[in-house]
Structures are given as C-alpha cells and as structure tokens.
Amino acid sequence: MAVVSPLDLLDLDALLTDEERDVRALARRVVDDRVRPYVADWYERGEVPVRDLSLEFGKLGLLGMHLTGYGCAGASAVAYGLACLELEAADSGVRSLVSVQGSLAMYAIWKYGSEEQKQRWLPGMAAGELIGCFGLTEPDHGSDPANMATRARRDGDDWVLTGGKMWITNAPVADVAVIWARTDEGVAGFAVPTSTEGFTAREVKLKLSLRASATGEITLDDVRVPESARLPTARGLKAPLSCLTEARFGIVWGALGAARDCLETAIAYAGTREQFGRPIAGFQLTQAKLADMTLELQKGYLLALHLGRRHDAVGLRPEQVSVGKLNNVREAIKIARQCRTILGANGISGEYPVLRHANNLESVLTYEGTSEIHQLVIGQKLTGLSAFAG
Ligand SMILES: Cc1cc2nc3c(=O)[nH]c(=O)nc-3n(C[C@H](O)[C@H](O)[C@H](O)COP(=O)(O)OP(=O)(O)OC[C@H]3O[C@@H](n4cnc5c(N)ncnc54)[C@H](O)[C@@H]3O)c2cc1C
C-alpha cells in the first residue's frame, strides 16, 4: 500500500505557488547538503560554524529574504515561512541563526535605521558577510523588558551605553549588535559595532538545548557610540516588540519543521523496527499516535499558511502571531516528545534527530515570548483586561 508523508495527506502543496515551492526546494537542498550531515556533531560539541553557514545562506538569498532593497530578496512572508520550516527541520539552532539575522537584527535596521545605517549594514548582512544580533533580554529582565536596566546617556554628541544583555543569539560571533537601552526619552535602539571599546560578548556555556547555536552574554561597559548609531525612528518599547512580532512569525513555521522531521523519523523507524514479530508501525497504539500527531502538524501548517497569507495581504497584528507561536510550538514539542517514545531507547540517541529537536523546542517555547506571555496577550485581547502585572 502507498505510504503518504504527513504533510502530503491533505495535498497541502496545492495551496502553494510555484515560486513558494521553489524557495522551499532551495532551502531543503542547502539544509540537506550543508546542515543535516553535520548537525548532530555540532550539537554534541556545542559549536556551529556560523560564519560559513551565513555565507552559504547569504549566497542563496535566505538572510533578510522577506525584506526589500539593500541586497535583500524581497520574498513573500509565506516563502520566508517555508524556508524557516525547512531550516528548522534540520535544527532549531540553524533556523535561529537565520531568524535573528533577518527578522531581528536586519529588520530593526531596515525598519528603524537611517539611510546611512542601512547602507552600512544591510547589504553585508544579506550576503552573510556581516553577522548581527539583537540584545533585548537581560539577566534580570526577560518577559518584562520595559524594566530593562541597560542605560544609554547622552554625552555631548555621543551616547554611552552601560549594562548587560543575556541569552543573545549570534552575539559571540556578531559584527553588529542591535542594543535596546533606556534613555531619558524612553527605550531607544542602537546599532553597535561589536568592536567598540567596552563591548564584550561571552559564550553561554552548559546549554542543554539549542546547542547548535551561538548564544552570548553581552557586557556594555561605558560603550561610547555616536548619535549616528542610534536607530532614529525607534521610539519606545514598541520598536523592539515589532521586531519580535516579525521573528515570531518565522517560529510559527519553523517549529513545524522540527515536528515534521520527528514525525517522518518516527514513521520510518516504526516501519522497520520489529517487536513481537511485527513492525511496531502495525500496532494500533502506534498508529493512533501517528494519526493524532499528523492532525496537529497539518492544523499547525494551515494556521501558519493562513497567517502567512494575511501577512502578505494586510500585515499581522501581534495577537495573531501569538496564536500561531503558542499553538505551533506547543504542539511541535508534544509531537517531538511523542515521537521519542516511538523510538524507544534509540529516541534518546543523537543518531536520530528526535530528542535534539525536543530539547531545542524547549528554547523555542521560551524565547520570543514564553507560552504564558502569549496566553496573556491573547487573554488581554479577549477580555480587554491586562493580566501582565499587578
Ligand atoms: C537559546 C535562547 C536564545 C535566546 N536568544 C535571544 C536573543 O537573541 N535576543 C534576546 O533579546 N533574547 C533572547 N533570548 C531570551 C528570551 O527571549 C527570554 O528567555 C524570554 O523572553 C523569557 O525571559 P526569561 O528567560 O528571563 O524568563 P522570565 O521572564 O523570568 O520568566 C520565567 C517564567 O515566568 C513566567 N512569567 C513571567 N512573567 C509572567 C506573567 N506576567 N504572568 C505569568 N507568567 C509569567 C514565564 O512565562 C516563564 O514561565 C533567548 C533565550 C534562549 C533560551
């Protein structure tokens, strides 16, 4: 009997354009050639060749691909989402590299930067020659960035930044850091060259999740930058939050990639693994698991595609992206853990991608707004009452 892959059951490909399928094929190819054969080893060593991958992704137009001008590809939101899905099917850390570069660091400069800042940074970042990071979270301020401790004070024509940022993806290898700091006029953003005196980024060690990703702790010790480093139109916290909305959209798709990879792995494994004299895929309990996971994967995909089409047509409201991130990451992690059970002891081995995906999704569940925060965003919209504080 013919076997159908989980995302083909409903012929969902019929909902994509030829161009979207082409972008997906391109992302799949680079992932198959440059990531899949090596990623388990990167994960085990806790090291990833960010520069090599950036150059490779840059060549293919995957960095800042949904932005226009300055060397960016100007692809649709759906095409960008499909690329995120394929990247994360290999590893969430690799998708994070691309998301942070394109949707956080590049987007912040593209949306809020001066023409000079855009010319200086964006073409090199789109090509993968320059790497960016986005520093909002601090050791003591994660879900509540409004209370950030990092300060920028004016000193003549310059700004002097003091404070620290924590859990910053790409920071240990970045050329430019978009740093959010409190000023007398509210939160402001700065495009800080990481070579500036007083700027240091230390690799965060002992991570048990997202190990194929460079994560850093940034210290800002009287970092002096000129006024021309300030993102001129970024006023208040809504500026970094708008960047997060962009990046979360990529996660809505990306998480499905991790889930798909787990499910495909589990189906293949169950088809060949025999217990009690027959393939475990033939047991009803296994099939019930596979069927239920496939339903969630496809529902998540339809949700992502709906959000993508709305994004391309009219843009998305933050609470709409919260629906997508909350649902798709939560379901993806459930799928990864369920698939893990199907692989038995092999499920905990790095020979298979399943527990690596599950562990990675623990980070994805937390970053770019925890599940609880997205529940509160949706709850606020439904009730008109904010439950965030007090
Ligand atoms: C691998 C990794 C990479 C990251 N990359 C970046 C990056 O590139 N740039 C960046 O700026 N940040 C980054 N982050 C940080 C991430 O965005 C934060 O970890 C996240 O926002 C949560 O903050 P926190 O860890 O301080 O948790 P906390 O805010 O301390 O939350 C702890 C728990 O309390 C809950 N909670 C908090 N407030 C409320 C409330 N009002 N009601 C109910 N529950 C609440 C949370 O949901 C969570 O369960 C990264 C994190 C990780 C793990």
Image (cartoon, rainbow, N blue to C red):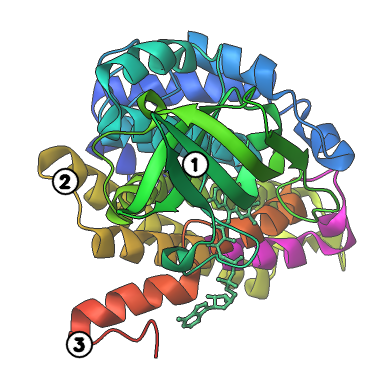
Q: Between residue 174 and residue 94, name the one nearer to us.
A: 174
Across and down, in percent, residue 13 comes to 32, 37
Which amino acid, mark 3? Answer: Thr
Identify which residue is drawn at 39% across, 50% down.
244
Q: Which residues are magenta?
A: 331-352
Q: Between residue 5 and residue 244, name the one nearer to us.
A: 244
Query: Ligand 1, what quadrant?
Result: bottom right
Marks 2 and 3, the one that precedes in the sequence: 2
Residue located beneath label 1 in the image: 179
Identify which residue is drawn at 68% across, 51% down.
357
Image quadrant where one finds the C terminus: bottom left
Which amino acid, mark 2? Answer: Gly
SS assignment at label 1: strand
Residue located beneath label 3 in the image: 383
User: How many residues crowd around disc 1 within 10 Å: few (fewer than 14), some, or many (20 or more)?
Assistant: many
Q: Assess whether residue 272 is covered by the magenta stretch.
A: no
- Residue at disc 1, CB closer than 8 Å to ligand 1: no
Real-space CA distance between mark 2 and mark 3, rounded to the nearest whole angstrom: 23 Å
Which quadrant of the structure image shows residue 219?
top right
Image disc number at residue 315:
2
Across and down, in percent, residue 305 comes to 28, 47
